[in-house]
Amino acid sequence: MSVMTITSQNFQSSVMEASQPVLIDFWAAWCGPCRMVSPIVDELAKELEGKVLVGKVNVDEEPELAAKFGVMSIPTLAVMKNGQVVKKSIGARPKEAIRAMLDL
């Protein structure tokens, strides 16, 4: 599965109503560490297809979603289960650390 773009319009159906855990990458195009994390998130989306949904929120285009999650620094990664944030990390992380956030 490819990475979905999460917006205010699809947040409820894509994240809050998801039956699987959702990994959300809060990012921006101008953010260097975000560009380092992005390919890792893309790889995990392919490797964990069917187990985890993966989405990205562009904080410049969706400032209200970033504010809702208290995102002050990017990249911020959040794992949601049953509509609740269960894990959150700030800054670039290696693939193993991001995978470990998912408890798989």
Image (cartoon, rainbow, N blue to C red):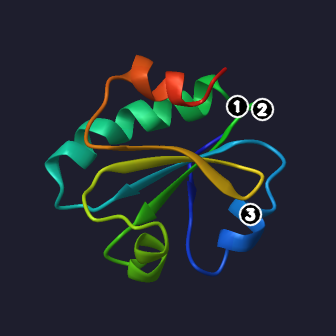
State how far apart marks 3 and 1 are (Cα): 18 Å
Q: Disc 2 designates what residue?
A: 50
Q: Disc 3 designates what residue?
A: 16
Mark 2 is surrounded, within 10 Å at the Cα level, by few (under 14), some (14 to 19) or many (20 or more) other residues, namely few
* Residue 46 appears left or right of 61: right
Q: Nearer the viewer, mark 3 or mark 1?
A: 3
> In the depicted view, which residue is nearer to us: 77 or 29?
77
* Relative vertical location of residue 57 with respect to residue 35 in this rendering, above or below: below
> In the depicted view, which residue is nearer to us: 77 or 42?
77
State how far apart marks 2 and 3 are (Cα): 17 Å
> In the depicted view, which residue is nearer to us: 39 or 33?
33
Residue 70: image location, x then y, percent:
40, 67
Residue 30: image location, x then y, percent:
17, 61
Q: Disc 1 designates what residue?
A: 49
Please report whichever mark, 3 or 1, sits nearer to the chain's N-terminal start: 3
Secondary structure, mark 1, is: loop
State how far apart marks 1 and 2 are (Cα): 4 Å
The reply to whether discs 1 and 2 touch (Cβ–Cβ < 8 Å) is: yes
What residue do we see at 65% from left, 27% from top? 48
Q: Mark 3 belongs to which amino acid?
A: Met
What residue do we see at 40% from left, 57% from top? 26
Q: Mark 2 belongs to which amino acid?
A: Gly
* Residue 78 appears left or right of 82: left
Q: Mark 1 belongs to which amino acid?
A: Glu
What residue do we see at 41% from left, 23% from top? 97
* Residue 98 appears left or right of 81: left
Residue 50: image location, x then y, percent:
78, 32
